[in-house]
Image (cartoon, helix red, strand yellow):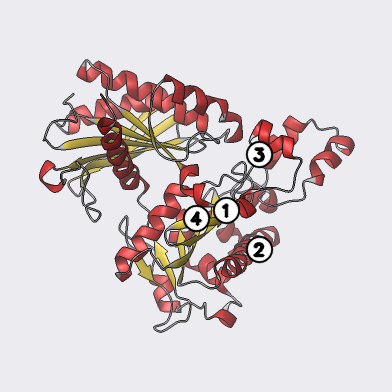
Amino acid sequence: MRSHDEDVDMNILVFNSGSSSLKFLLIRYPAERRGASGQPDAADKGIPLIRGMVERIGGTATLMMTGDGTQEPIRERDVPDHRRAVEWIFESLGESIDAPVDAMGHRVVHGGSWFRESVVIDETVLGKIALVTDLAPLHNGACLATINAAHEAARAVSGTDVPMVAVFDTAFHRTIPDHAATYAIPEEWVTKYGVRRYGFHGIAHASSAAAYVETVGRSLEGTRLITVHLGSGCSATAIRDGCSLDTSMGFTPMEGLVMGTRAGDCDTGLVGYLARHADLTVEQIDRLLNERSGLLGLSGRWSDMREILKARELGDQRAELAVAVFCYRVRKYIGAYLAVLGGADAVLFSGGIGERSPLIRARICEGMDWYGLRLDEQKNSAAITLQAGSAVCISPDGATLPAYVTAVDEETWIAREALRCLQHWKGGQP
């Protein structure tokens, strides 16, 4: 590995781990584009060398890679866990591209109360990430496995330790004011257990906002945005001046919108009621709310919105109810965040559902014309395939509150955060 003190290009390998998937990006920041501080220009997105994803980790997985605008043939292999997925990625990168890895950036979902910004990873950082794994059980464990495997794989290639940076989803929401982040609960729960609203999907919300301002040519300063990230996990965020003021997810990623298998908002009293009357333990209830609720619970069969929409077209009433509940909950949060922000300059849709389902976007915006939020049917139908980091308007010209679809680029955002963090870390070294 080359020292990041050298006046040379910096290659950063990014890992974005999900519960059963692992996205990756190898990106280069040329030395000549970095100023005296060593950081890239604000508009510089770097040069992507190769990006890809391993899906269906835990069984017969697939690996897709795209480099220089060309997609390589999809590969298949038995991949039991994230460690094997990382090893496969390093092996494939070695076959496909001759470029050293100078640093790595890792998305980490929950940083607890310790991490309010990105940090260089060491044993202390790893220990603290592990302590909050039960608050993001579907993700933090996978993040840790990826970090440890990447450390070992990079060392095996380079013969030395490669610096790694943890970029936290929760960090973007550090600006939420106390009155929005504090629950009405006994103070001891706050001081002893750190119970508060942390928020998640921060990297996606930040990337969505950045794509919008770049597209329309305005600054985040003075801009009010409602970002709606809809996928297997879903959340909404109120953003002013580039800062999060409120977000739908809370202490864990369970709160807020209806999700693939997570219930979102529901009466906390149901936990005690079910424990007393359904002969269920707290652990069982927690698992059911995390893994068997949401769209899956509503439809009875599917957690994937694409399958639900197909069933709805065939007259399945539970599928129709799932769509109605899902869209109503999003619309309610948009209304709430209009109140939080005192109005908004745009509503931004992102995520697998938000980017690729015109019908869901249209259903969400139904009845919002009272504030000028309405969609252009033709524009909305056409906005289904966007380049990463871009945004497109789906409202009529001159709409009071325009809506946009944004294709978030979490991996590039993580890379820039890693570069910024490493420069700060280097500057603080003796």
Residue found farthest to the bottom: 398
State the residue position of label 2: 320
Which amino acid type is shown beneath numbered disc 1?
Answer: Pro
- Please tell me which of labels 3 and 1 falls first in the chain: 1
Q: CA distance from mark 3 to mark 1?
A: 15 Å
* In this rendering, the label closer to the viewer, 3 or 1: 1
Q: Residue at x 59, y 82 (%)?
A: 370
Which amino acid type is shown beneath numbered disc 3?
Answer: Val
Judged left or right of residue 421, residue 10 is left
Q: CA distance from mark 4 to mark 1?
A: 9 Å
- Please tell me which of labels 3 and 4 falls first in the chain: 3
Residue 185, percent from left and from top: 75, 44
- Please tell me which of labels 2 and 4 falls first in the chain: 4
Residue 269, percent from left and from top: 82, 45
Residue 62, percent from left and from top: 37, 35
Check disc 2: other Cα within 10 Å, few if <14, some if 14-19, many if 20+.
some
- Please tell me which of labels 1 and 2 falls first in the chain: 1
State the residue position of label 4: 244
Q: Residue at x 21, y 47 (%)?
A: 40
* In this rendering, the label closer to the viewer, 4 or 1: 1
* In this rendering, the label closer to the viewer, 1 or 2: 1
Picture layout, residue 358 above or below residue 51: below
